[in-house]
Structures are given as C-alpha cells and as structure tokens.
C-alpha cells in the first residue's frame, strides 16, 4: 500500500521540493546552531550559496564526534520549551549521543514510519507485535508511533522475555512483527524448544532492521516463520527507524523517504561523492527537521543508491541493504571482510544454526579471525553429542574452505554445541575484538 503521493512523484517535482527544503534547513542551522555557523564561516559558505541540490557538496560533513563534543544539547536548533522528546544511543565508548524532537518532528517521523509499515505489508486494523526495545533507543517508540498512525493495533511488547512474546503472538494473532532479525530468530528458537512451529503463527509480514543482516538470513527467517521479511533502516542522529524501508513487493533495496532526508554516497577515505550504483559511505542531510536538523551526516554505513521506478510503483531512490559499518570492516592480513558477508556464506551450511560470532585476535604481529559457529541440535544428537566426533572435524574443514574461497580469508573455525553462543534481545554482537585488550584465545 502506497500512503503518500510523494512516493510516486516524478523526480523533477521531488527535486524541486528537496531544494526548497534544503535551502530552508541551511538558513535555519546557520542562524540557530553556532556549530554550523562556525563551520560554514570557516569554509566561506553562506546559506545563499545553495542554488542547486549539487551545491550540497559545498557544505561541511557532520560526524558522531561532533555530537559527542556538543553533548548533550549543543546542536539543537530550538529552545528547550519547544522539545517534546529526546532519544539517545549508547555507543560503545564515552558519552551517548543525544537527539531531540519537536511535536512536528514526531509527527513527521510517525508519518514516515507509517509509510514504511505500509510498504512492508501492514494494513490498518492488523495487529502489530513490536519487539523492538522501548526507551532511549528509537526502535520501540519509532515503530509504535508509525503503527498507530497507520491505524494498526499496536502491541508494545518491547524486547526480552521470549516466553511472553510467544504467548502474545499466539493469543493476539498479529499479522506484522517487528524486531531485530537476530531477536526474531531467538524467539523462533524458543518456540521450537516448546515444540511449536513458528510457521504456524498468524504472522505474515516482518519489519526487521537496526543491525546488518544478509540475504541468506532473510531466507532463513522467512522459511522459519513463513512470512515476508523486509528491511527497515534508520539511525537516531537522522530521526530513527523509517529513513528507508523495503517494499514487500520487490524486496530489493530500501526506498528512502527522500522528501525528508537527502542521501549521498561518498568515498569514506577521499570524501568524494560517488555515482549511483557505487558502494560507499551513506551520508544524510535532514530536509524538514526542527529540533535537531543535521547536515551531511556521515553514517558510517556502507551501501549504494539506485534511481528508477520500482515494480511497486514507488519512484523514490533505493539504498542497497547495508553491508556493514565502515568501522566494522575487518581488515585481516590485507583482505577486507564484513561480518554480513561471512554470515551470508555461513548460512549455506546446513548443519549449523544461524548464530555466529567473530573473534579477532592478534598472534604475534598478525591479526587472525576465529569464527565461532553452532551446530544444530538434531545434527549434534546424531553424533552422540560428541564435539570430538570426526564429523565435527570434517565440518570444521568444510567451513574453513567455504570462508577461504568466498571471503578470501583463512579463519580458525570453532564448532560449538547447540545453543552455546549468546542470543540477542536487541542488536546482536557479531564481532569481539580481543586485540586491544591482549586477551588470547
Ligand atoms: O537502530 C534505528 C532503527 C531502529 C532502525 C529499528 C531500524 C529498526 P541507532 O541505534 O541509532 O538507530 O543505530 C543506527 O544501526 O547507523 C546502522 O549501522 C545500523 N542499522 C540500522 N538499521 C539497519 C539495517 C537504529 N536495516 C545504526 N541494516 C545505523 C543494517 C542497520 N544496519
């Protein structure tokens, strides 16, 4: 279901709207946020210099570190009494990054998430089971407001307590389920432990994101749950979930809410703009935000853009599935590897469950990867629950071979017993870097 005519408008019309909004945003940040005024002045740029969308390249980039150094509210463009909400992301080090919303911002966000849920297959009157975490994280409340806006019966379960999730799914019979792909898999696993089949539930559509996941992972989840799984993307610095969303008709790339966010792809090293189709770092400029407008925010996420009309009828630009974060890219003995690539190939191995972890270690001066995988329960039973079984040895060799030939990296592979790797309730931790701490495994 297409909610808004802007999603199918022609590019010329859309670009006209984008330019007007960009000019307004630039004027706004220049007059209201000293950080931007200073950066623009350093470059000799004035708001009047933005005559076309291409002129966006005159503007400076913004990075997470800028948010941190203006913690908590230094980049806000409205006085405190105009705010109605803040969110924050924890980050792994130092202070969280804080973002703010006016009532109008929440309204816009609800609108784009409503569009996203509609693109993913949700319809007014359906029940929507929302297993994203509620709180400072934008996932729970972001999906919640969008779901209500579209007119779905919203079940604010939040993350955690898989048993309760299962009971509510069985009793309320939702058509739509939302959560991180890794958590949705954990719920399925719990159901199987209880002797239930997730494919028999009422759920028809899944809206999954907040972490990188592969095409193979989509297949696994779709098979297990007998649903259509679509990818939703967003980040708190830009607004939260709903910046882009896949349509359930094509399931091939995520439509960006271009009337509110202007995307660019840059080379993360040279910072040059890259043409459509080329992979690089995603950069977003907000076009309509009031409390926390953001200019050329470097997301750290790797993707590409493609223009053209989609089979669903939408004309908005699509971003590819996020391959990973610039800082998640592992460079092992000169070869670049993203965890999502490892995931893709790993999930072709029938004997394994879809849970894994990569441990980075340093042996002498060389970095190495240890790939921890988990054997399926039924396979393990057939081996008399013996991890020393010759079949495990052969399986290890097979995985090593697959990784070497597909990702071009030699990995130490450790096959673990069933259900031994940590399960996530939110964003899965796929990489443990043990190099800095000097922990040897
Ligand atoms: O994760 C917002 C969100 C909530 C998106 C629910 C989708 C669903 P943050 O916590 O600020 O916001 O984290 C943003 O998560 O820069 C990406 O690295 C990653 N990410 C988000 N969505 C996807 C996705 C939310 N679909 C960071 N695929 C982003 C891959 C994703 N990575």
Image (cartoon, rainbow, N blue to C red):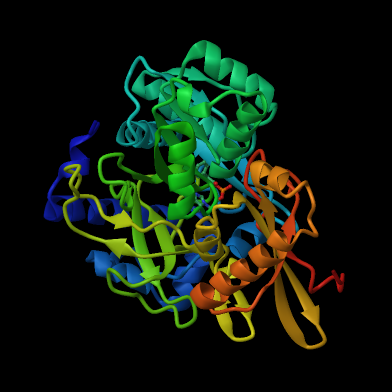
Quadrant hosting residue 373? bottom right
Q: Position of residue 389 (x, y in %)?
A: 76, 58
In this image, 370 relative to 18: left or right? right
Q: Is residue 64 above or below residue 112?
A: below
Identify the residue shown where x is 49% and y is 73%: 406
Q: Which of the two residues, 337 or 91, is positioned nearer the viewer here?
A: 337
Q: Position of residue 219 (x, y in %)?
A: 43, 46
Can you name the residue that lies furthest to the top here? Answer: 171
Asked whether, in this view, residue 305 is left or right of residue 181, the answer is left
Residue 300 visible in the picture: no
Q: Quadrant of residue 411?
A: bottom right
Q: Where does the C terminus fall, quadrant-wise?
A: bottom right
Q: In percent of the image, x 35 and y 59: which residue is there?
A: 263
Q: Please state if 136 lies on the left or on the right of 290 as rendered.
A: right
Q: Residue at x 35, y 35 (%)?
A: 120
Q: In this rendering, is residue 73 above or below 36?
A: above
Asked whether 175 or 106 is in front, the reply is 175
């Amino acid at each position: 279901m297409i909610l808004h005519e802007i999603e199918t408008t022609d590019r010329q019309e859309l670009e006209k709207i984008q330019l007007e909004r960009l000019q307004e945003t630039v004027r706004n940040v220049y007059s209201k946020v000293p950080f931007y005024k200073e950066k623009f002045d350093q470059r000799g740029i004035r708001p009047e210099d933005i005559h076309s969308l291409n002129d966006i390249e005159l503007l400076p980039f913004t990075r997470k570190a800028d948010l941190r150094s203006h913690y908590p509210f230094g980049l806000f463009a409205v006085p405190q009494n105009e705010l109605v909400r803040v969110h924050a992301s924890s980050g792994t080090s130092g202070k969280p990054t804080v973002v703010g919303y006016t009532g109008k911002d929440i309204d816009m966000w609800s609108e784009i998430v409503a569009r996203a849920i509609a693109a993913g297959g949700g319809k007014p009157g359906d029940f929507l089971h929302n297993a994203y975490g509620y709180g400072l994280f934008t996932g729970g409340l972001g999906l919640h407001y969008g779901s209500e806006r579209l007119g779905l019966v919203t079940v604010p379960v939040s993350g955690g307590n898989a048993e309760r999730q299962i009971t509510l799914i069985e009793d309320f019979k939702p058509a739509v389920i939302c959560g991180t792909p890794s958590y949705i898999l954990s719920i399925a696993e719990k159901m199987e432990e209880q002797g239930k089949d997730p494919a028999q539930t009422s759920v028809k559509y899944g809206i999954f994101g907040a972490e990188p996941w592969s095409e193979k992972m989509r297949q696994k989840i779709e098979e297990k749950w007998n649903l259509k799984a679509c990818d939703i993307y967003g980040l708190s610095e830009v607004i939260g979930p709903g910046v882009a969303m896949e349509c359930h008709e094509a399931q091939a790339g995520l439509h960006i809410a271009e009337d509110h966010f202007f995307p660019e792809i840059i080379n993360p090293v040279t910072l040059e703009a890259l043409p459509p189709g080329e992979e690089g770092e995603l950069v977003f400029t907000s076009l309509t935000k009031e409390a926390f407008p953001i200019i050329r925010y470097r997301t750290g996420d790797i993707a590409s853009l493609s223009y053209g009309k989609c089979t669903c009828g939408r004309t908005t630009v699509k971003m590819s599935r996020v391959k990973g974060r610039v800082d998640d890219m592992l460079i092992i003995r000169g070869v670049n590897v993203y965890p999502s690539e490892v995931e893709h190939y790993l999930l072709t191995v029938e004997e394994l469950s879809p849970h894994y972890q990569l441990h980075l270690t340093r042996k002498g001066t060389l970095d190495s990867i240890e790939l921890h995988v988990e054997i399926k329960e039924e396979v393990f039973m057939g081996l008399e629950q013996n991890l020393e079984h010759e079949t495990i040895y052969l399986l290890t060799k097979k995985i090593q071979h697959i990784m070497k030939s597909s990702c071009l990296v030699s990995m130490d592979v450790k096959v673990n017993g069933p259900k031994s790797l940590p399960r996530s309730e939110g964003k899965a931790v796929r990489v443990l870097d043990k190099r800095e701490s000097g922990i040897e495994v």
